[in-house]
Image (cartoon, helix red, strand yellow):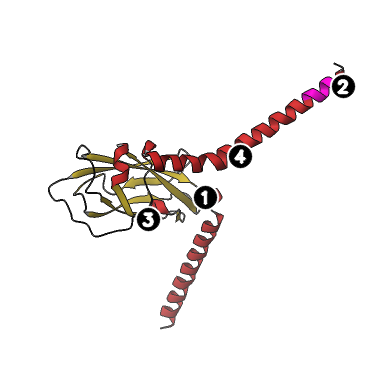
Amino acid sequence: MSQSEDKKAVTLTSFKLVIFAIAMFAFCMWVLPPLYTLFCEVTGLNGKTKGQYQVTEVQVDTSRLVKVQFVATKNENMPWAFAPAERILEVHPGQAVTTHFVASNPTENIMVGQAVPSMVPHNATDFFHKTECFCFNQQALAAGETAELGLQFIVDQEIPKGVNTIILSYTLFDVTENSKDIVEQKRQELTTATQAAAELITNNIKL
């Protein structure tokens, strides 16, 4: 093989490697996450919890208590303070329960966070129903703002008898870079609130 042919072969191989790398990147970014979500929903592995639950009338099983422990963690790049208001609750199956987590943004900028839930034991995921959860939406906090993030849930009456403790964990991620519309909406809300406060002060002075 001539030197020219060698160069062409090397160039072709390099081009194929670049195309392969791009294809793998696209697969990891756009194909794997939906597949992972579907896999977890079907199998319940990794403790991935289900979405919003529609409330139906149920009887509360007062003969039994299930302990629910709440854990808050953060991605290494998330500077917020994040913690459950109550670390442990004992609930009756069928009982509608309301609690919340607390998040604070110590930075000087508007930031957006997304909480991702997981649960152990894995066989409890089908029996833990979230009727309202801050994890359903992204959370925008202004600089220095602290917010209570609500959570409402019901432990199903059909939960296996061997499950006496459930650990519900939320990991908080910084998604500000990919949430520019939410950041702008928050900025407009702050501007409107500031203008309203200034007008109220001006009106009080005139009175």
Q: Residue furthest bottom?
A: 207
Q: Which mark is residue 4?
A: 2
Q: Earlier in the sequence, mark 3 or mark 2?
A: 2
Q: Earlier in the sequence, mark 2 or mark 1?
A: 2
- Per the image, label 1 sits on a secondary structure element best described as helix
What amino acid is found at the position of numbered circle 2 in the picture? Ser
Give the labeled residue for mark 3.
Answer: 147
Real-space Cα separation, disc 3 to disc 4, in angstroms: 36 Å
Contact flag, marks 3 and 1 (Cβ < 8 Å): no
- The residue under the point 38% across, 38% down is 43
Real-space Cα separation, disc 1 to disc 4, in angstroms: 21 Å
Real-space Cα separation, disc 2 to disc 1, in angstroms: 50 Å
22 inside magenta stretch: no
Give the labeled residue for mark 1.
Answer: 176
For this view, does 88 lie left or right of residue 150?
Answer: left
Give the labeled residue for mark 4.
Answer: 26
